[in-house]
Image (cartoon, rainbow, N blue to C red):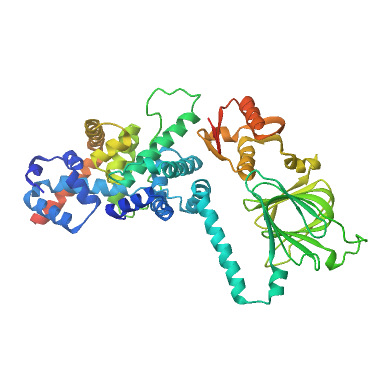
């Protein structure tokens, strides 16, 4: 580095000089040598150099906002939106195959294997499927959902596992509802929530670590799987709904129109005073649309009154007209401006 | 701070669709991007949304992205643009006279300094910085805190190289004037003289 130029430097010149500033910001050995040499050459510059150095050092002692706590959370959002779907499917398929292989290796008897093997039913985005189980119970699966049960279903308490959304019509086995034998029970497992059915029609929505249960007819008992202590169960009567997140009740109430819980089965969209983002979430979850938006504020806008439409196209038209936003649909993408 | 070659090879992997590399770029830059964003707004949701949008955009456009001279520089520029756009759309109904209608605020509130002289200097810096226009504050920050060089700053702030020199010159000039006007300058002179005398004795 050329030292001669520093002969006529003022405080401001030092602060403007790339070499000088870099030597203070990234103190490496080479730089501090450079520094020492300069002081040797220009002892009269000591004050300016020291002031400049002290100014930079002290300016750099400032508050930081690193937002570390939110790093994982924000990444989850990015991952959910950007991660290639194909890759994820292959991955889970591989995982599933590995599990299946492991079961084989363990080498349980062929019958036991058959008996315990899971029956899996799943739907892709936008697909609705009816699953009729051995006992006559029907489950209507909404898009992007899966239901599984053991092949030996019906001998013991009937147990099913649900991800996504399903509308259950459970067949009674018990003659006397006041006295239900263990073998007559019907249990829906959702992550860490169990729904015990006492003969009934009800809707379960198990997505995004939130489980929403709404009862249309009959009676169900909802229990969170709590490792530490037995969580109190909730008995739902027709029209009741309850929402769980991380094993806790976050919402509880009475539905004005419980029969509307089944609206999705007719591909009907019903929303009342709903925020735009929640409406779009439904499209994302059950139909697999990718939602893109340029205006974050618009996502919080609420559509006043009630929307009751059939079909995605009609829904988008309604949103566009009532919120004065332009919506473009390009195959799998919905773009909102 | 990872080396430039490392970040660039990471960048190239990411451009080929490597999810791990993409994750790593996020993890390396999340904190500094939040810190930079926080200078423009205290709206944490907005900053997070901007970082989110930035990374979504990166992934969707990865095939068309060039290889930047510095990844950090590229991310800062992109984040700044997104934040500006978001803030502009938020304040759509308020008048915007300036092309830079946002504040740029560096805070020193949480820093504890035990040394009296340093504390005095810190207070002075604080009050001087506050009087500078936002653009000058930003350039001081990019230069002295982040250590970006002139071409990089020009790129981030979307101005040409000579404007960058002029802007920093102006900012430093304002600082110098303010510092000189203060008693502190005198204290400094005395302090240094004392030092020199001390040595002579």
Q: Quadrant of residue A27?
A: bottom left
Against A229, residue A330 (above or below) is above
Q: Quadrant of residue B132?
A: top left
Residue A110 image point, x, y percent: 68, 74
Q: Is residue B30 left or right of residue A9?
A: right
- The quarter of the rendered structure image containing the N terminus of chain B is bottom left
Q: Is residue A171 left or right of residue A246?
A: right
Q: Is any part of residue B105 visible from this angle?
A: no
Q: Residue at x 38, y 36 (%)?
A: B104
Residue A316 image point, x, y percent: 63, 31
Relative to the observer, which residue lies in front, A4 or B197? A4
Q: How many marks?
A: 0
Residue B58 image point, x, y percent: 41, 43
Q: Is residue A276 left or right of residue B44?
A: right
Q: Is residue A83 left or right of residue B32?
A: right
Q: Residue at x 90, y 64 (%)?
A: A179
- The quarter of the rendered structure image containing the C terminus of chain B is bottom left
Against A327, residue A204 (above or below) is below
Q: Quadrant of residue A171?
A: bottom right
Q: Residue at x 29, y 50 (%)?
A: B118
Q: Is any part of residue A210 visible from this angle?
A: yes
Against A15, residue A158 (above or below) is below
Q: Point out the residue furthest to the front here.
A: A110
Residue A144 image point, x, y percent: 64, 49
């Amino acid at each position: 580095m050329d030292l001669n130029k520093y002969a006529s430097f003022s405080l401001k010149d030092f602060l403007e000089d790339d070499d000088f500033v870099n030597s203070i910001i990234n103190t490496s050995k080479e730089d501090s040598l450079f520094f020492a040499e300069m002081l040797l050459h220009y002892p009269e510059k000591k004050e300016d150099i020291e002031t400049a150095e002290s100014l930079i050092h002290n300016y750099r002692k400032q508050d930081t906002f690193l937002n570390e706590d939110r790093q994982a959370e924000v990444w989850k959002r990015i991952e959910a939106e950007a991660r290639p779907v194909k890759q994820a499917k292959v991955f889970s398929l591989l995982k599933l195959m590995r599990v299946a292989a492991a079961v084989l290796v363990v080498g349980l008897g062929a019958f036991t294997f058959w008996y315990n093997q899971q029956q899996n039913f799943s739907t892709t985005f936008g697909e609705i499927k009816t699953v009729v189980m051995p006992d006559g119970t029907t489950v209507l699966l909404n898009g992007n959902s899966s239901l599984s049960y053991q092949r030996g279903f019906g001998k013991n308490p009937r147990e099913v596992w649900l991800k996504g959304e399903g509308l259950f019509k459970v067949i009674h086995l018990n003659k006397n509802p006041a006295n239900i034998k263990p073998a007559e029970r019907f249990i829906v497992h959702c992550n860490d929530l169990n729904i015990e059915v006492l003969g009934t029609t009800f809707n379960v929505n198990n997505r995004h670590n939130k489980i929403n249960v709404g009862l249309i007819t009959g009676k169900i008992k909802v229990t969170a799987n709590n490792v530490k202590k037995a969580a109190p169960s909730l008995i739902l009567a027709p029209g009741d709904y309850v929402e769980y997140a991380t094993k806790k009740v976050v919402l509880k109430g009475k539905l004005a129109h419980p029969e509307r819980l089944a609206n999705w089965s007719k591909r009907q969209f019903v929303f009342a005073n709903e925020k735009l983002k929640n409406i779009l979430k439904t499209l994302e979850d059950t139909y697999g649309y990718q939602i893109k938006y340029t205006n974050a504020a618009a996502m919080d806008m609420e559509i006043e009154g009630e929307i009751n439409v059939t079909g995605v196209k009609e829904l988008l038209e309604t949103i566009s007209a009532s919120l004065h936003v332009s919506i473009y649909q390009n195959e799998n993408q919905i773009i909102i401006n | 701070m990872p080396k430039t070659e490392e970040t660039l090879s990471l960048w190239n992997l990411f451009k080929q669709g490597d999810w791990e590399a993409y994750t790593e770029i996020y993890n390396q830059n999340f904190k500094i991007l939040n810190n930079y964003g926080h200078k423009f707004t205290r709206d944490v949701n907005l900053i997070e949304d901007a970082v989110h949008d930035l990374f979504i955009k990166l992934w969707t456009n990865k095939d068309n992205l060039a290889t930047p001279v510095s990844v950090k520089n590229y991310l800062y520029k992109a984040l700044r643009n997104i934040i500006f756009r978001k803030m502009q759309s938020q304040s759509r109904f308020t008048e915007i006279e300036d092309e830079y209608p946002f504040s740029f605020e560096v805070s020193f509130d949480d820093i504890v300094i035990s040394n009296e002289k340093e504390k005095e200097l810190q207070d002075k810096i604080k009050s001087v910085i506050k009087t500078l226009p936002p653009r000058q504050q930003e350039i001081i920050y990019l230069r002295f805190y982040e250590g970006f060089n002139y071409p990089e700053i020009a790129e981030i702030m979307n101005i040409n190289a000579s404007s960058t020199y002029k802007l920093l010159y102006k900012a430093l000039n304002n600082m110098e004037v303010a510092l000189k006007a203060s008693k502190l300058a005198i204290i400094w002179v005395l302090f240094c003289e004392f030092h020199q005398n001390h040595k002579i004795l």
